[in-house]
Image (cartoon, helix red, strand yellow):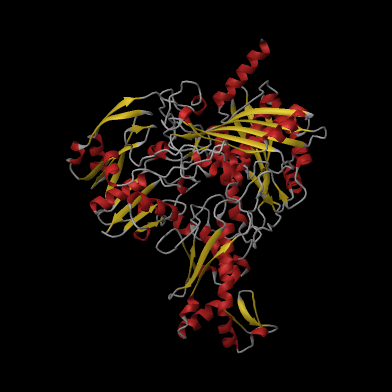
């Protein structure tokens, strides 16, 4: 059992089908007679729809239907739910309307204004060309930082000044008092650039209607919330709406949401009685997907004479895009302050977040003030403070680390356990920070600039703290494991089979995971916020324990022994002190023979009492060519504390992927618009995703302290790579450039921007 047990680097069982082309993604589903759907999207960023004529498209060959916002207005609730945030004065923020198909006005390039369904893709494309739309242009706000300027065009009439919400939390008076008496005060303003998720598989959905039931399949991170929203939009009883996920090629939070296309496709299927499938093209996804970041943050810190933190203040303007999402309400209150204080012993914090509308991406709200953004701001601030005060950055962090656990943060969260000093000490040694001066001198001898950057992050596992599991013994001798999470590439099939194998002794190869289907799984928390393995693993173990106890009387009968003489160990019931045993699989066969079918199915839920807090230290070295502005990450070291690792190989893979994502945002990726709100990033020719030659080798180590907040001691690792990489790489970039006169950098540190900063520094020096 040890080969597939706890903390074993088991290879992913799902890879065989993925790598041989046997995956079943949305576009792979063969639906008999399925029609093809396409959306007509707005070419302008802000306008009233003066005319939309679809008559020619409806008469075109092969077309089975064409729908506009006006059609949906008459038939269904043509809008998605809108998150409401309570403002700092106690009033509610904006609760506006986001239509599934634009009705009256468009608010970003790429907003869907019509939907066509036809027999073939070519016929659908031809029909789109026949739709006539006239737009009356409105003034455009193409950047978040301009949306608050006096006289800026208002995106939503019900949102004066383009403010979606103006929220704050913390003790402002105490913070002001601490700053007034501080020995050292530092202030830094930074930009957290907007990025596109660009998962390998683009979004899409397929819907069918049989006269009673609606079936919708889409690539997502949990179907239950989308089923509820579809039911409300279409006016259907939830029991008649069935939502499922096939294989999903990447999520990153983007696919947690219901997007406007899904109700539109479902409505069209219901109207026509046909199965209709829509799959986004890459450039289409760039225009219509949920995006992330887009923050303008001023952060301040005060220190006493011993360089201990006495107060933190953050003022963040967060781009919402053209609309808010259903999750907007959680952005400040649920995410921002959970880990705002990071690894540091600090209780005086004030955080303000102002959500702002602009004619850019559809939604930015799901990361309006989340963990990666705030850790980035905090760790940029800590490095800035070290430079301003004149102390080593690692030493400043070390002086302020939390050392006594459990620890209650400024937001009321309880960090259960950790050893931040030990983790950072390991990282500094593994990164050979002591040898950095010699490496810097060698780089300078070759005309290059070398910089070192550090980030110490604390994450939190978020989302629903309750998860369910269902273990079912199938007639073919296998075991079906139903879970409430959804894999989007993380290796859940492997890890969850490891849990069940380790706990109950069920053969690893006999276990089949079933997920993402409202027909087969009544409820689930979905995947997001690094919750999946910890929450689902805890549920699997809890239900496995119930199953073992349910089988105990049958084991007594089979072994002909009293309950007091039987133990369950190494995956089997055993008479203590003997080699006489029987495993669960054999007992399941016995139960089937004897008609005890209640023993063939075990289900229930488990609640994890508290959140856990993965943490770690990232150390990056970047090299800059002053002649070209080219910046490359040449060394990267990570030491993480994820508690107990179920599968170290998969955890390290998660970190590698997250670091790549972070390096991409820090150096290459940028969402940009022209003054008319036209996107300049809709292909990989324009949007620089990180490539293999942008990546260094990543040295990973684990220094775990088991969490006390759950029975399995896990802390989660899904977002840890990105959370740490943003600040580590950017701090390293500034460290490299400061010797050349550059005093401030922002992401992305692209060659043209770096070269521009260097030229400006030369000009300032000459002046």
Q: Where the C terminus falls, by quadrant?
A: top right
Name, please, the residue furthest toward the top.
Answer: 767
Front in this rendered view, residue 536 or 79: 79
Q: Residue at x 71, y 31 (%)?
A: 176
Task: Examine the rendering and report whether any part of residue 452 can be seen.
Answer: no
690 left or right of 635 in image: left
Above or below: residue 742 compared with residue 115: above
Residue 663: x %, y % from top left:
58, 37
Residue drawn at (34%, 60%) of the image: 240
Vertical arrangement, residue 3 with respect to residue 61, above or below: below
Quarter holding the N terminus?
bottom right
Q: Nearer the viewer, residue 74 or 41?
A: 74
* Outermost residue, right side: 306
Residue 333 spot, x, y in % from top left: 58, 43
Report which quarter residue 123 is drawn in.
top left
How many circles with numbers are drawn on the protein? 0
Q: Residue 86 vs residue 28: left or right? A: right
* Residue at x 17% of width, y 40% of height: 59
Please tell me which residue lies in front, 327 or 757.
327
Whether residue 446 is visible, yes or no, is yes
Closest to the observer, 97 or 122: 97
Image position of 304 (left or right of 713): right
Residue pushed farthest front?
90
> Looking at the picture, how far across and down is residue 543, in whole percent?
56, 69
Residue 337: image x %, image y %?
Answer: 63, 42
- Is residue 79 toward the left or the right of residue 578 in the image? left
């Amino acid at each position: 059992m040890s080969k597939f047990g706890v903390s074993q680097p088991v290879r992913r069982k799902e890879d065989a089908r993925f790598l041989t082309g046997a995956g079943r993604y949305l576009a792979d589903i063969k639906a008999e007679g399925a029609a093809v759907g396409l959306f007509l999207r707005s070419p302008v960023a802000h306008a009233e729809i003066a005319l939309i004529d679809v008559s020619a498209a409806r008469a075109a060959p092969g077309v089975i239907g064409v729908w506009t916002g006006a059609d949906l207005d008459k038939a269904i609730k043509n809008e998605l739910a809108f998150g409401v945030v309570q403002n700092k004065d106690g009033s509610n923020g904006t609760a506006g309307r986001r239509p599934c198909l634009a009705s009256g006005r468009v608010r970003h390039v790429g907003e869907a204004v019509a939907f066509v369904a036809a027999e073939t893709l070519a016929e659908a494309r031809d029909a789109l060309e026949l739709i006539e739309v006239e737009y009356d242009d409105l003034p455009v706000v193409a950047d978040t930082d301009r949306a608050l300027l006096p006289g800026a065009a208002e995106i939503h009439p019900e949102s004066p000044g383009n403010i979606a919400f103006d929220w704050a939390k913390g003790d402002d008076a105490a913070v002001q008092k601490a700053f007034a008496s501080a020995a050292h005060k530092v202030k830094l303003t930074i930009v957290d650039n907007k990025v596109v998720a660009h998962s390998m598989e683009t979004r899409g959905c397929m819907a069918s209607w049989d006269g009673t039931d609606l079936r919708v399949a889409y690539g997502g991170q949990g179907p239950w919330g989308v089923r509820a929203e579809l039911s409300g939009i279409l006016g259907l009883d939830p029991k008649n709406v069935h939502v499922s996920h096939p294989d999903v090629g990447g999520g990153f939070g983007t696919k947690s949401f219901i997007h406007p296309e899904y109700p539109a496709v479902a409505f069209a299927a219901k109207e026509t009685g046909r199965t209709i499938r829509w799959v986004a093209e890459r450039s289409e996804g760039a225009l219509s997907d949920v995006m992330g970041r887009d923050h303008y943050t001023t952060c301040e810190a005060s220190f006493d004479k011993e360089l201990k933190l006495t107060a933190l203040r953050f003022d963040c303007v967060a781009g919402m895009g053209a609309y808010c999402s259903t999750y907007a309400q959680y952005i400040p209150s649920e995410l921002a302050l959970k880990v705002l204080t990071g690894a540091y012993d600090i209780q005086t914090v004030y955080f303000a977040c102002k959500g702002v509308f602009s004619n850019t991406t559809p939604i930015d709200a799901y990361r309006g003030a989340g963990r990666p953004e705030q850790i980035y701001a905090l760790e940029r601030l800590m490095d800035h403070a070290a430079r301003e005060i004149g102390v080593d950055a690692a030493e400043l962090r070390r002086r302020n680390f939390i050392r006594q656990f459990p620890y209650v943060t400024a937001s009321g969260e309880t960090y259960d356990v950790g050893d931040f000093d030990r983790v950072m000490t390991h990282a500094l040694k593994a990164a050979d920070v002591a040898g950095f001066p010699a490496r810097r001198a060698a780089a300078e001898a070759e005309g290059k600039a070398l910089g070192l950057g550090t980030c110490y992050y604390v994450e939190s596992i978020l989302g629903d703290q309750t998860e369910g599991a269902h273990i079912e013994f199938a007639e073919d001798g296998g075991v079906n494991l139903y879970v409430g999470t959804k894999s989007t590439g993380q290796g859940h099939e492997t890890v969850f089979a490891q849990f069940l194998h380790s706990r109950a002794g069920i053969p690893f190869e006999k276990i089949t995971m079933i997920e993402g289907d409202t027909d087969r799984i009544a409820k689930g928390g979905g995947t997001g916020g690094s919750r999946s393995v910890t929450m689902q693993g805890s549920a699997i173990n809890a239900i496995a324990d119930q199953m073992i106890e349910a089988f105990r009387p049958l084991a007594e009968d089979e072994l002909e022994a009293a309950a007091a003489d039987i133990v369950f160990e190494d995956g089997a019931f055993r008479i203590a002190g003997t080699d006489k045993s029987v495993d669960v699989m054999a007992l399941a066969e016995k139960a089937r023979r004897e008609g005890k079918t209640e023993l063939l199915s075990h289900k229930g839920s488990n609640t994890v009492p508290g959140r856990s807090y993965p943490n770690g230290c990232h150390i990056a070295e970047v090299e800059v060519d002053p002649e070209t502005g080219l910046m490359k990450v040449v060394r990267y070291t990570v030491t993480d504390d994820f508690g107990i690792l179920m599968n170290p190989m998969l955890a390290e893979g998660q970190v590698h992927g997250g670091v790549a994502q972070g390096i991409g945002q820090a150096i290459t990726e940028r969402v940009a618009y022209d003054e008319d709100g036209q996107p300049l990033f809709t292909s990989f020719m324009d949007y620089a995703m990180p490539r293999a030659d942008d990546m260094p080798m990543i040295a990973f180590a684990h220094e775990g302290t088991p969490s006390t907040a759950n029975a399995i001691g896990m802390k989660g690792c899904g977002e840890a790579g990105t959370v740490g990489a943003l600040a580590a790489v950017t701090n390293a970039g500034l460290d490299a450039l400061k010797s050349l006169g550059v005093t401030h950098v922002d992401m992305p540190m692209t060659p043209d921007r770096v070269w521009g900063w260097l030229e400006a520094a030369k000009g300032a020096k000459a002046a």
